[in-house]
Image (tube, rainbow, N blue to C red):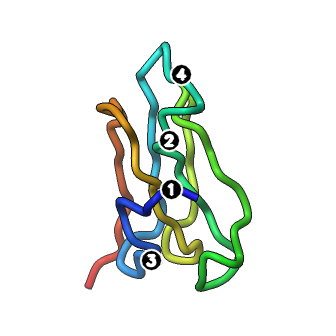
């Protein structure tokens, strides 16, 4: 497995996160997968989403531990979040 570039975490202040991948020619060998987990450790991996152009991901970030794998080139992926009030 590649080194994790964004550490495994659940974002408690965020309710929903959305990511849009824009790299049209992304290759599987370039890494950069968004990993969504069923549990609090990497041993609980549920799904790894490849950053292929046109892919949109929407997930409950407060309840879903997640991480991003190291990419070997720039990944164009704007993201947005819906947060709860403090």
Q: Earlier in the sequence, mark 1 or mark 4?
A: 1
**Mark 2 or 4, closer to the camera:** 2
How many neighbours does mark 4 have within 10 angstroms: few (below 14), some (14-19), or many (20 or more)? few
Q: Looking at this view, is 50 or 82 the one in front?
A: 50
- Give how far apart the Cα atoms at labels 3 and 4 are: 25 Å
- Read off the residue under disc 3: 9
Quick one: quadrant of the N terminus? bottom right
Residue shown at 55%/74% (left/top)? 65
Q: Earlier in the sequence, mark 2 or mark 3?
A: 3
Do tag 2 and tag 3 residues touch (Cβ < 8 Å)?
Answer: no
Residue shown at 60%/83% (left/top)? 41
Position of 2 relative to 40 (above/below): above
- Read off the residue under disc 2: 31
Position of 47 relative to 42 (above/below): above
Does dot 3 land on a helix, a strand or a loop? strand
Position of 6 relative to 29 (above/below): below
- Read off the residue under disc 1: 2
**Mark 2 or 3, closer to the camera:** 2
**Mark 3 or 1, closer to the camera:** 1
How many neighbours does mark 3 have within 10 angstroms: few (below 14), some (14-19), or many (20 or more)? some
x, y (%) of residue 52?
A: 55, 27
Q: Earlier in the sequence, mark 1 or mark 2?
A: 1
How many neighbours does mark 1 have within 10 angstroms: few (below 14), some (14-19), or many (20 or more)? few
x, y (%) of residue 49?
A: 62, 45
- Give how far apart the Cα atoms at labels 3 and 1 are: 17 Å
């Amino acid at each position: 497995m590649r080194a994790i570039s964004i550490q495994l975490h659940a974002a408690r202040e965020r309710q929903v996160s959305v990511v849009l991948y824009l790299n049209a020619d992304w290759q599987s060998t370039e890494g950069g997968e968004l990993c969504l987990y069923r549990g609090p450790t990497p041993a609980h991996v549920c799904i790894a989403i490849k950053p292929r152009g046109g892919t949109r991901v929407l997930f409950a970030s407060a309840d879903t531990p997640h991480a991003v794998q190291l990419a070997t080139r720039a990944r164009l992926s704007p993201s947005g979040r819906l947060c709860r009030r403090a």
